[in-house]
Image: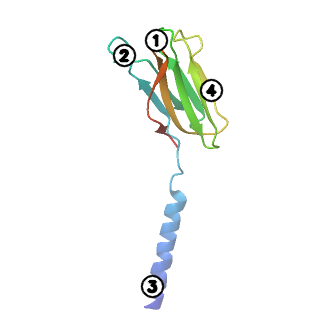
Amino acid sequence: MRNRLAAVASGLAVIIGAGVGLAPTASAIDGNTHVNRCGPFFTENCGHGGVGDNNRRVFAYDQRSDGYGFRTSYRMLNGDENYIEDPDGNGGNSGQVWTPSPVTSYRVCSKQGNPIWWQCSDWIWVL
C-alpha cells in the first residue's frame, strides 16, 4: 500500500509539474478605445487611443478638426506615468510613442469646450 501511495504521489507531482511548466506566461493585451462625446449631440467619435505591440507602443489620434485635442495617458510597469497628445485633429501631430517599460494601464481623453475640460474614459488595465 505504501508503494502504491508513493507511486501515485510521484505521478501526480510529475503531472502537476508538467502542467505548470507548460502553462502560458502572462501576456500583454493590446487595446484601442474611443471617446464618443463630440458633435452637437455629444454622440460622435472624438478620437481613439490605446496600446499595441506587447504594451510598448502608445498612440493617440484626434479624429476631429475642431481645434481641441485628444490624449492617451498611460502608466508603466516601472511606476512612471506619461501621455501622448494629438493637439489639433488635423493629422499633423497625431502619432505614437514607444515606452521604455511595458504599459500596465491607459485611458483616453478628449479636450472639450470653453473653458477647457477633458472627457476621459476609465483606466483600462492591459497587463
- x 38%, y 21%: residue: 36
Given this view, does label 4 or label 2 mark the residue nearer the observer?
2
Structural distance between the alpha carbons of marks 4 and 2: 26 Å
**Cα–Cα gap, marks 3 and 2:** 66 Å
Seen in the picture, residue 12 relative to 30 is either above or below; the reply is below
Q: Residue furthest left?
A: 41
Q: Which residue type carries mark 2?
A: Glu
The label nearer to you, 1 versus 3, is: 1
The residue mark sitting in front, 3 or 2, is 2
Instruction: Quadrant for the N terminus, please.
Output: bottom left
Q: Which residue is mark 4?
A: 97
Sooner in the amino-acid sequence: mark 4 or mark 2? 2
For label 3, the residue is 5
Instruction: Determine which residue is flagged by label 2.
Output: 44
Q: Is residue 104 above or below residue 91?
A: below
Q: Nearer the viewer, residue 11 or 84?
A: 84
**Helix, strand or loop at mark 2:** loop
Frontmost residue, 42 versus 96: 42
**Residue type indicated by callout 4:** Val
Residue at coordinates 55% horizontally, 25% vertically from top-left?
59
* Camera-nearest label, 4 or 1: 1
Give coordinates of residue 58: x percent, y percent: 57, 29
